[in-house]
Image (tube, helix red, strand yellow):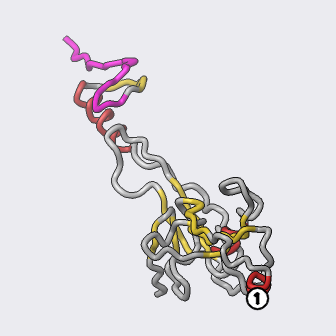
Amino acid sequence: MDSISTYLTSTIVADHHGVNKTIDGVWQTESELENELEKRVKNIGWSAWSEWSTCSRSCDGGVAQQLRRCHAPNGCRGEPVRHKICNMQACPESQDFRSSQCAAFDEVPYDGQLYKWTTHYDYSEPCALTCRGRPAHLPDDSDDRDSFGLDDEPIVIVQLLNRVQDGTRCRTGSLDMCIQGKCQSIIFV
């Protein structure tokens, strides 16, 4: 009698290791099928990294990021995002990135009135956008304030956003940057 090889031709909906996929194929033994399932489960993991995002700043150092997704049913090792420093050349005109973020709120009413917002550093939360607001109807020159008797006008200090934009310096004179709301040390090698 001729020996007949056993073939498994299957369409299997596998819930083996949490994988729910239809697999079509031909395997000589069940152990080959098991090996194929194991191999496919191991190949499920991180997606490829995305393209680098646009740099958060055009000069004075910003941050770009790449993202990836985990496709493994039980999670993946590593981080889903990575960053790089970009556009480190000096800006042609001196700019304070944090100040421009505060000034973006100049036309947004706060407690029913407009304020002119400037930088205020909250060293306990260096990556929050905390700004000092002066009522917009006041003159810019502090000498004029005294002559108009406006010393009693309230100055407010407010956290306008939980996070500054990526690439904002954590502190004046520091190269450390806020990235995703956390102060990160920048080391050049």
Residue 92 appears in the figure:
no
Q: Quadrant of residue 105?
A: bottom right
Check the picture and name the quadrant holding the N terminus: top left
Q: Residue 160: where, in percent of width, then height? A: 59, 61
Q: Residue 71: where, in percent of width, then height? A: 42, 41
Q: Residue 110: where, in percent of width, then height? A: 67, 57
Q: Which residue is mark 1?
A: 143
Is the residue 139 above or below the residue 108 in the image?
Answer: below
Is the residue 135 above or below the residue 144 in the image?
Answer: above
**Magenta residues, start to end:** 1-19
**In percent of the image, x 46 and y 76: which residue is there?**
123
Q: Nearer the viewer, residue 5 or 76?
A: 76
Q: Residue 84: where, in percent of width, then height? A: 54, 71
Q: Nearer the viewer, residue 167 or 122?
A: 122
Badge 1 amino acid: Asp
Q: State left or right for residue 32 relative to residue 147.
A: left
Q: Nearer the viewer, residue 128 or 59?
A: 128
**In percent of the image, x 79 and y 80: which residue is there?**
148
Q: Quadrant of residue 86?
A: bottom right
> Is residue 16 inside the magenta stretch?
yes
**In percent of the image, x 58 and y 72: which residue is there?**
167
Is the residue 42 above or below the residue 102 in the image?
Answer: above
Q: Nearer the viewer, residue 93 or 36?
A: 93
Residue 1 appears in the figure:
yes
**In percent of the image, x 29 and y 25: which residue is there?**
28
> Is residue 71 inside the magenta stretch?
no
Q: Quadrant of residue 79?
A: bottom left
